[in-house]
Amino acid sequence: MRKLLMPLLLVTAAAINTGCFIPIYSSSRDARTRQLIYISESLRHIPQIWERVWAMEMPDIATPYRTHGGVI
């Protein structure tokens, strides 16, 4: 039983990982192209989202010169 179950489990895991059972994209060329364009467009905006989250696009508020340290 174990000799049959282990190879079957291995083949099933390999088939699921390659997208054989559940295809990621449509089989139609037009629909697949549209899906790939949508995915690539959303991935293109990741650096801008990252900068907005970490406020890297904001001007630096630290002064480049030394202040006297007193209250003005």
Image (cartoon, rainbow, N blue to C red):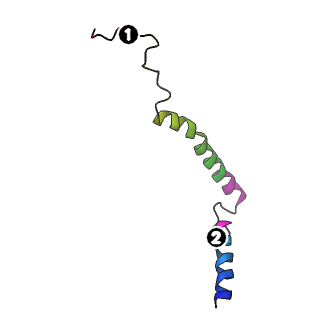
* Amino acid bearing label 2: Ile
As shown in the figure, which amino acid type bears the numbered disc 1? Answer: Thr
Residue depicted at 64% across the width and 70% down the height? 16
First in residue order: circle 2 vs circle 1: 2
- The x, y position of residue 24, in whole percent, is 63, 61
Q: Which mark is residue 67?
A: 1
Residue closer to the observer: 36 or 19: 19
Q: Relative to 60, is 29 on the left or the right?
A: right
Secondary structure of the residue carrying numbered label 1: loop
Q: Which numbered dot is residue 16?
A: 2
Q: Is residue 48 above or below residue 17?
A: above
Residue 4, relative to residue 19: is it above or below? below
Residue bounds of the magenta highlight: 16-34
* Residue at the spot 27% in from the left edge and 11% down from the top edge: 71
Residue 41: % across, % down: 61, 43
Where 33 falls versus 52 (above or below)?
below
